[in-house]
Image: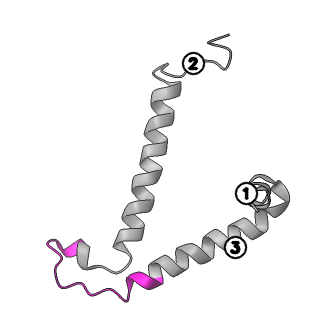
């Protein structure tokens, strides 16, 4: 079972199915956010539908960009054969 999942996420032949799956997951996440009550938001943007999905996506993308910057530009990343 796990072997099929690893092949699905690693094989370029399944690129179209992965993109479709991730798009459906994103749409369902944003659609589910419309069903949540927004009575207790402290700030106005917390009451916007889809804010949680948007904030999560931007936060994750920012973490990736900052990590790559620190690794490549600030020379924190080591080569593959560093410990050999």
The residues bearing labels 2 and 1 have C-alpha atoms spaced at a distance of 27 Å
Q: Considering only order in the chain, which callout, 2 or 3, is on the residue closer to the N terminus? A: 3
Considering the numbered disc 1 on the image, is that residue within a helix, a strand or a loop? Answer: helix
The residue to which callout 2 is attached is: 78
Could you say which is closer to the camera, residue 64 or residue 73? 64
Marks 2, 1: nearer the viewer: 1
Q: What residue is drawn where x is 63% and y is 18%?
A: 79
Measured as percent of width and height from the top left, residue 25 is found at 57, 74
Task: Look at the image and say whether residue 44 sits in the magenta stretch.
Answer: yes
**Left or right of residue 30, residue 10 in this image:** right
Q: What residue is drawn where x is 46% and y is 36%?
A: 67
Can you tell which quarter of the image residue 33 is in?
bottom left
Colour mode of the rendering:
one colour
Q: Residue furthest top?
A: 84
Q: How crowded is mark 3: few (under 14 residues within 10 Å), some or many (20 or more)?
A: few
The residue to which callout 1 is attached is: 9
Task: Look at the image and say whether residue 43 sits in the magenta stretch.
Answer: yes
The residues bearing labels 3 and 2 have C-alpha atoms spaced at a distance of 35 Å
Residues rendered magenta in the picture? 31-45
The residue to which callout 3 is attached is: 20
Measured as percent of width and height from the top left, residue 3 is found at 78, 56
Q: What residue is drawn where x is 68% and y is 10%?
A: 84
**Left or right of residue 13, residue 56 in this image:** left
Q: Residue furthest right?
A: 13
Could you say which is closer to the camera, residue 69 or residue 53? 53
Could you say which is closer to the camera, residue 1 or residue 52? 1
Q: Residues within 10 Å of mark 2 (few under 14, many from 20)?
A: few
């Amino acid at each position: 079972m796990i072997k099929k999942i690893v092949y699905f996420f690693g094989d370029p032949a399944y690129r179209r199915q992965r993109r479709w799956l991730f798009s459906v997951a994103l749409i369902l996440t944003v659609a589910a956010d419309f069903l949540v009550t927004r009575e207790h938001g402290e700030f106005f943007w917390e009451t916007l539908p889809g804010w949680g999905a948007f904030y999560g996506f931007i936060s994750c993308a920012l973490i990736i960009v900052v990590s790559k910057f620190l690794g490549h530009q600030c020379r924190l990343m080591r080569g593959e054969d560093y410990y050999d």
